Amino acid sequence: MSILYKVVNALCSAFAVYLIVYATFLFLSVIIGASTMYARRRRTYYENKLDVKSFIPISIIVPAYNEEVTIIETVRSLLALDYDKYEIVVVDDGSKDDTSKVLIEHFGMQPVIRPIRSRISCQPVEQVYECYDQKVSITLIRKKNGGKADALNMGINASYYSYFICMDADSVLQYDSLRKIVTPILEDDKIVACGGAVMLCNGVTLKDGKVIKYDLPKNIIACMQAVEYSRTFLASRLLFDRFNGNLIISGAFGLFKKDTVIAAGGYDHDTKGEDMELVVKLHEFCVLNKIEYTIKYAPDAICWTQAPERLKDLRTQRKRWHVGLFQCMYKYRNFFANPKMGPVAIISYLYFLLYELLSPYIELLGIVLSVLIVVLGIINVRFAIVFFFVYVLYGMILSITSYLTTIHLQGLHIRPVSIFKIIGLSLFETTYIHFVMLWTRATALVGYRKNKRNWGTIQRKKIDNS
Amino acid sequence: MSFSYLIYLYILICVCLIAFEIGWLIYYGARERLQRKRTAQYEEYLRQQCETLASGGELPPLDNRQKLFFRNVFSNSHKIIAFACAFQNVSNEYPDEIRSAVGIVDEEALYIMKHVQGHTKSASKVYSLKLYADMTAYTWRNRPGRIVEYQFAFLTDPSVYCRTYAMDVLYAVGTANDLHRAVMLLSNKNLFYHPKVLMEGLMSFRGDHRVLSLLLIRDFDSLSEDYRIAVLEYCRHRAPLIGPFLVDFLTGEYSVDVKCTTLRYFRKYPIPEAKEIIIDFLENDSKYAWEISAVAAKALSAYPEPDVKELLKRKLSHPNWYVRRNSAESLVAIGLFVSEKAEIMNHSDRFAREILEYNLVVAEKSKMRVGADLPGGDVL
């Protein structure tokens, strides 16, 4: 019994240290995130003087697979962007629905014989369509199915300009997002990639990329994710940005320097987390080739995306993310505590390993230990309740303040009654959904070998951008 | 360490974070309210001044109280922001009167500039300069005087925004010599200034572009690479008659980027002296970097002569993808007779046929001219 007591005590102490480190990290992140956003907001009082007229030309690559419901609105939102020089390249990755057909009919696209130079290998082209009547040129490439990474590589091959943006086909870029995401490049010529902020469009009315009406989603699952996204962006991305340690640029919205991506090998077909994989690859490529580089984050460049509204779809998405994370962390395991790779390896990689990849298992162990320490009398029940209360309150305060800060700094407004909804949601998330997601992530790798290339399907709805 | 103590430590950190969050919200809210109050006060002051001017009255010279007022505004970045917001709001209502309303006498402006120079935080300098540029461009346009000198101190500030705003003042009120000096200073100090930002700024210069472009070209060899590109791109947009001075950049010991940018200049403003050199770049491409040959192929669209056409037709089968593509674009831009099109369509090289057919389709359907002006730095 005493041996069990000692073992449980030791494990509990280790778990407590784990929680302390995480709490400290979050504390630092919030301080830095809040001060960064505050400084940026001060700067927005002035017109951005680096807002040049002959903009840096950008190719926007939109990989699409079975996106007939959302693709028209996505492309229409891209045409409404407040930017002078860009092109749109939609890559239909062998869709089984009418993705290409709806685009061709809506925009009057014409088939062309256009040679595309394959700088990165990908599945062959079936047909290229172009459209010349719109504000900017739109290219539609139908190709044999090869996955999202393959479609992105095709888009890179076909793109015309030196910088490209990858985005999802079910997302809408805010009208000023291109200007905002390009600004860091005008400030620093070493930037090879820049990520934008992703916000949820469930419950939001957009018109030509401008927010007409903002409200919390009605659906509770989507609503909970709205709060969660704010916490993630404010809490961790801004901190990692300080020391060039960002390991993820969201696949929904990221700007990349084409030549560097091609030199690094493009997107990887063998992973579900191709967005994270590319960023880590860029870190590795630049460090090993002694290229001075920066990977930045532009928190005011907004992309609106749909969140799954069914728990089943959310679980599918989070399982995919966790598998992608595992694949990426395993592929780049040479980063682990490797000082040669810089702070990104020592701090960021370690953080993602302990607090993202392994966290479901560690937290599940923590739950078991929590029960054991009460049973064994290591702590009394009252103390356990206080601890749990502080844990829940901490999570809630963090979620609420992150969300409200993000909303305020983006110049959005919510109804006062929504604040009560957010309080209730954060309680719901911390006490229930968090544990559901914990179990989802913990079991994500079950059947990994069999399902590693299967993305699953998620129900889509038409985005309100009329 | 005892497990309980660790939990207490965790609770302590959580409580600190919660306290910080609440404290931050209270502080931020209070700050915002103070800013709104300041902005309203400044708006009232500016509105009174503008109303006096609008009704035909004159404003008396600045008294000590007003001088102190302006010095106070520029002493703190929050006040500068509040004043800038007030300035913006009132300028929407009184666009003609606003700048006269804040016209500052020489000594006062110089005092403020000296004070701004002393701000330790770049953010303060940045905001001050921006506000000052907005407020005084009108006042100082005809008598720039010493105000221009002060901008050179800001040019070496680490903040790119500070440098940009200082250059904005120079674009508005400086001479060609002032700008030339500024560009040389930035280049010699090796300060990062995005070529596009510099190019755009130089294009907005209100003085004599020919004089400025010649000054910059004269000292071209002293500039660093990025600045050379920016200067050439600027010349391409604002200096159509300096072609003869740029021919040496094609033949001299310059980088690929400089030669490509010069080629783009000659595509826009072709001169006979450059033609043979450009033809040589494409004809004897093995001697040059492929980028130079590719851009030369595009530049030849400005020389619609039979020998150029024949050369471009031959280069439709070039091993380099970009040379072939640009040759096709140039041929379409120059124009092909029906017989020439037929000749190429019967060519044995599949790519030559495809690339030409594609460009013909684009030329027919697109609203853009094929071979349209591309952003600087792109080879394609």
Image (cartoon, grey):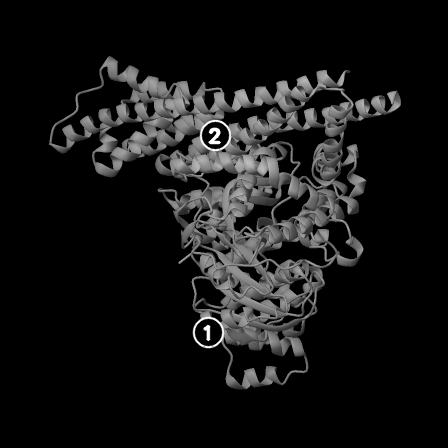
Q: Position of residue B128 (x, y in %)?
A: 39, 26
* Residue ID for mark 1: B365
Q: Residues at marks 2 and 1, common chain?
A: no
Q: Is residue A144 above or below residue A46?
A: below
Of residues B181 and A4, the one nearer the viewer is A4
Q: Which residue is mark 2?
A: A38
- Residue B297 vertical placement versus A235 (above, below): below
Q: Position of residue B115 (x, y in %)?
A: 40, 18
Compared with A248, B34 (above or below) is above
Q: Is residue B52 left or right of residue B169?
A: left
| Camera-nearest residue between A419 and A18 | A419
Identify the disc placed on residue A331. none
Q: Amino acid at mark 2?
A: Tyr
Residue drawn at point x = 70 percent, y = 69 percent: B319
Label 2 SS: helix
Label 1 SS: helix
Residue at horizontal 54%, vertical 50%? A307
Q: Residues within 10 Å of mark 1 (few under 14, many from 20)?
A: some
